[in-house]
Image (tube, rainbow, N blue to C red):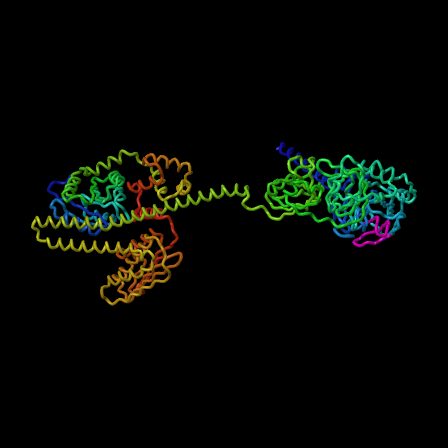
Amino acid sequence: MQGRTERVKLLIVDDHPVVRAGLSSMLAMHPEIQVVDATATCAQALESIKRHLPHVILLDLRMPEMDGIAFLQLPAALRGNARVIVLTSYERDEEIYRAVQAGAQGYLTKDASEAEMVNAILRVNEGRRVIPPHIANRLADRLMRSTLTARESEVLKELAVGLTNRQIGKRLRISENTVRNHVKSLLDKLEVSDRTEAATLALRRGIIQIDP
Amino acid sequence: MRNRFVWRLVALCLTFAGGYAFLKVTHPATQQLPYHDHFATDGLNGWESLGGTWSIHAGTLMNDSAERGAKLLFGSNSWSDYSLSTDVEILGPDGDAGIIIRSTDEQLGTNAYSGYYAGLRTHDDRLVLGRANYGWLESQTIPFPTGISTHHWYHLELAAAGCKIAAVATDLLSGVRSTVAMEGQPCVGKGRIGVRSYATSARWRNLVIAPADGATLAALHATPAPKEQTGIYLPLLNPALAAELARRRTIAPLPQASQLLRSIGSLRYASSVDPAPVSIRGTVILRWPMLFLEDATGGIAIPNEDSLRFTLGDEIEATGVPALGNFSLQLHDTKIDVLGPGKPLPPKSVTAAEAATGVYDAQYIEVTGLVAKNESKQEPSSLAINSGSQTFRVLFPPVADGARPPHFARNALVRVRGVEAVDPRLTHNETPFVLLVPSSDSVELLADPPWWSLQNMIWIGPIGLIFLLLTQLLSVHVRHMRVRAALEERERLGREIHDTLAQSFAGVGYQLQAVRSSLAAGSPNVAEHVNLAIDMVRHSHQEARRSIAAMQPELLEGTKLAAVLEERARHLVQGTPLHIIATTTGEARQSSPRVMDALFRIGQEAIANAIRHASPATLKILVVLDSRSVQLVIEDDGVGFDPAAELPGLGLVGMRKRAEVVGAELLIISRPGRGTRVELRSSLRRKPEIARQFETRRVHERHAREN
């Protein structure tokens, strides 16, 4: 939808100042790309979008206040229909899955080379999806597994805290038996044998998260 | 509805019926006259004892104590004109025994009742009649013509009609009788009956209560004293007593000690083919189930004798035919003469093994042992005792109705005093001997069973097991928590590195690529790019140092927190004249790394704010540690600010959120021109770490929604 001659307007959203500065410097060296702004939070990003109408947004997933996924889940109009490339240092299955599901057109890790990154920005701007092969593999892995239901995820979270079925039931206001059924079903889905393993796996895959 | 009414009616009827039956059972005082008590079937049901040791043997009521004024009461307080007659026998040398009528208001004590008493007194050989009203008012006494003997039955009748009271006593052997009477106003009009003895054991039998009137009283006075009267009573006696009475009548002079007295021990070796009667003297050592005598050489059983008329310790001369049957010595066809009261013999202390040889047969002995089994359900109740390798049984005499048979805990150490019997009819060949005890007091508890009894072990075992199991579970849980905590901490460190070092490296990497690109393009701002890269590296280095500082163990204990913050503050001011006061009070406490990290970061932010925006002259850093919380206060005397105004630059939102994440209270007090005080308090009470992390997540989500 943009002409070839037009430069790609890029917005960088990352809470780490060094990353913001480095990315800006690096991408500014490319004539096809115009870094219109670099913001530390999603709120600032929304302000900036109104002003600069970027074509592509490089989005970090993990940020204080509103994280990348939440940002992605906002109505597309709010972000000026800009396409979003998730740029993160995580490559956990669940995060990739959630980001793609939330509408990210690209998924890059921060160790991606300059060329990869520029290439990805340009291709996403053209309306294509960019997911590097190794990430695509993991995503495929994740898609093969059955998804936990919302209730199962909730139960899994409480379970990882170390609560018993009864306590979980009390907290979620469901019966202990129901909790037991959920636990059984999620153990099956995660293909683990016990609760501890489920909790560890859930943390490792990023199904549930611990904030620092 | 109707159904329910019927049920209620039925329940009501049942209640009344039950109540009536209960009253009937518990209040036999509503007994109708005439009443006749043979003391054969009903036991002491309905009788009330005040003092004394009461029991019933073969139709005879007995008080086996020398208590002064022991009473046994019966009947209804509404009885007024009636006569009470009974046979009475005095067993002790010095006292009196008799009957009470129209008794009310009875209590324990010598004359503690209100009523009339007629009795036979041995020490002055009199028939007495009088009124008791918590004191004794003797109305009339009369010497009994033939004297009053112990171990001798008299018939006593006491009747009341209106205010006239009369009593008559009759010697059942000779027929000699005496009458006494009294009349007085005011008189006790109503009351129940009783038997009473004073300072002696006594026996009563053939108790009859009949309605009386003036004619009855007159008859009492008038009735001559025919000797044949006694014959009337004979059929009422039990056969053994009747035989005894008959025999006594024929034995005019009591047997003389003409025959040579033998020692009991020597009878054991007497030839059984010679059934010649012998005379022995001994002390009464047991009365139940038969009379036992013991002298210095041994003991002997005297069956078929009315043993209850003797008292333990009585000196007795007995003449009869000795027989040695079933390893035990017995005296048959006995004639007995009471020589006088004596002292009960002390028991010989022997071991069960010695007793098992049978040497102490029919002798009063004392054995200690452990209780093996209570058999109180059987009659007579008994106790199995283990002593060494021997087991023997203790047979108790029958107890009065209502009294509980003695019960001893298994394996309790007891000392038993009783008369040994090796008779197979008693031992059933199950034990080498049994001990016949005079009363349940003869078994004395020396020591309770040890706590490590089998029964206790059976209890302790499972409880111990459960306890062990719980401990095990707990330790597993603790280990689990510890592993979890370690994992969490590792996770936290990983994130810390990711959020600082990894980001920095990525950023610096991008910057270097920019440098490379500008070099390749021959761009003039290469130096600029390189300078930015250097700044980035410095920033990253600082960040890394901060992370490391936050991991110092001293910081975790809280004691170094103030010092580290002070160092940061000095680093920030870099030479400008700011007076910094850092104070720590309280002792080091182990607290969560996350909490201390949060305190550190919030403190750092507050200090940075103060130095950057408030231009203070003094900065106070105060850390207060106590047993439950850690408190951090950063106070400056700078320009202050209006808390109502939104000041995004101060990072207050970030501070608040950090505090919320670790569950700390954050209080920021400031007014323009009055300085700023940041107070932060965190409870040290542990909360599951992950739980807090999820709370954190919720906080994030909420913020996300709000924003």
Observer able to see residue A31? yes
Where does the image place residue A194, in percent across and percent down from the top left?
35, 38
Asked whether, in this view, residue B273 is left or right of residue A212, the answer is right
Span highlighted in magenta in the image = B115-139
Q: Where, by quadrant of the figure, is residue B85 drawn?
A: top right
Observer able to see residue B48? no
Q: Where, by quadrant of the figure, is residue B161 drawn?
A: top right
| Quadrant of the rendering where the N terminus of chain A is positioned | top left
Residue projecting furthest to the top = B3
Viewer-proximal residue among B339 and B117: B339
Where does the image place residue B501, in percent across and percent down from the top left?
22, 50
Viewer-proximal residue among A140 and B176: B176
Viewer-proximal residue among B3 and B486: B486
Viewer-proximal residue among B545 and B533: B545
Where is B530 relative to B306, above or below? below
Where does the image place residue A80, in percent across and percent down from the top left?
21, 43
Q: Is residue B145 magenta?
A: no
Where does the image place residue B557, in percent across and percent down from the top left?
34, 57
Asked whether, in this view, residue B587 is left or right of residue B318, the answer is left
Q: Main secondary structure of the magenta part?
A: strand
**Count of numbered circles on the image:** 0
Q: Is residue B129 magenta?
A: yes
Asked whether, in this view, residue B198 is left or right of residue A89, the answer is right
